[in-house]
Amino acid sequence: MKALGPIPAGFAAEGGVLVVGGKPVTQWVEEAGDTPLFLYEADRIRDRVAQLRRAMPERLALHYAVKANPFPSLLRLMNELVDGFDIASGGELDIVTGAGIDPALVSFAGPGKRDRELEAAIRAGVTLNLESEAEADRALAIAERLALTPRLAIRVNPDFDLKGSGMKMGGGAKPFGIDAERVPELVRRIAASGAEWRGFHIFAGSQALDGEAIAETQGQALDLAARLALQSGVALPHCNLGGGLGIPYFPGDAAVDLQLVGERLAARFQDLPEVLKDTAFCIELGRYLVGEAGIYIARVIDRKESHGEVFLVTDGGLHHQLAASGNFGTVVRRNYPSAIATRFGAPVEEEASIVGCLCTPLDKLADKGGFPRAEVGDLIAVFCAGAYGATASPASFLGQGPALEVLA
């Protein structure tokens, strides 16, 4: 029997049924009209943001990385809770503006921005995080043609990465950002162009659980920002220190020591060099804010045995939860936290694999986990499904289509 990942604290049952947002999941499914279904618990998101605010220095602003989950109802909730938004495409720009978010609160990172995306961002007043000198040239030319003043920042490819991160975004050759040694010259050129200079975006990695490593990386980002500001000779108005805070998905994972990270950053803010005294700082978080607030619900369509193994076949699968299937960047497949939602808290009775409805052996949501006995009609829950689920999975594979989504 293989271990399951840790279910986030605080989930309870009512009559043996998992409760989300104050109601049993069976009621949510009935109201939504079908499964599979993503439920995002608003109060968990509010609590996570409040927890961050308490732990982090007051000077630090909080941005939401839209790529983690761009569900419009969730974005409208975030608009009440955070200080800014970070997007990575023109499509996400349309989504955030459609959700009523002020474009002045938005920054746009990502390599390969098309001219039409640059133009839309400049027209809207979004801050562009430039990923290359060529992108800077294109943005300045478009702004001149439009007779508008662009808001320009530089995404820096730092000369370090975030140790222990699940995805390294800095250090060495990268398609992201501009190598640190080339940044000062471009800063001076942007400042001389008459554009509104907006500062640096320094993102070294993501999905790290080691508070010491996160604190060390934030310190390195501050040192780099100071060095580049001095070398450029141009005041630094703003610096995005990136994100990196991960959540526990797998057996043995432990939550980030948020207090340690906050205390270490507060100490650095108390001792900033003169060149950063007037700089505004933010961190950019996606998964950490919404990941543990999401639950993916699917229904058992068939219960079958093959060579002595039990398979719970559901109407969901990797087309909605690619990461939980182990096919989204993981080398060794491990089980996400999962449960039988309609028998929540019941004792383990059997070893079973939860699989999806796709014609591929990759479509597995839990491999040989310990569960109470489930029957056709039962609901399964995959936890930590609030980030990189609905929009980071191949929903159109085999014509299955997207899951329903509800802010609970």
Image: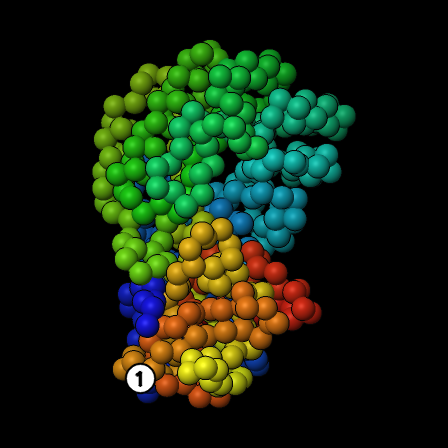
Q: Is residue 4 left or right of residue 64?
A: left
Vertical side of 153 occupied by 249: above or below: below
277 or 27, which is in the foreground? 27
Looking at the image, which residue is at 29% across and 49% down?
A: 256
Q: Is any atom of residue 82 visible in this view?
A: yes
Vertical side of 229 occupied by 263: above or below: below
Looking at the image, which residue is at 45% across and 12% down?
A: 231
Q: Which quadrant of the structure image shows residue 352?
A: bottom left
Q: Quadrant of the C terminus?
A: bottom left
Vertical side of 64 occupied by 217: above or below: above
**Circle 1: residue type:** Glu
Q: Position of residue 87 (x, y in %)?
A: 56, 44
Q: Is residue 93 left or right of residue 17?
A: right
Q: Is any atom of residue 389 visible in this view?
A: no
Q: Position of residue 232 (x, y in %)?
A: 48, 13
Q: Position of residue 316 (x, y in %)?
A: 54, 73
Q: Position of residue 214 (x, y in %)?
A: 32, 38
320 or 348, which is in the foreground? 348
166 or 291, which is in the foreground? 166
Circle 1 is placed at which residue position? 349
Looking at the image, which residue is at 76% across and 25% down?
A: 145
Q: Which quadrant of the structure image shows residue 148?
A: top right
Vertical side of 400 occupied by 330: above or below: above
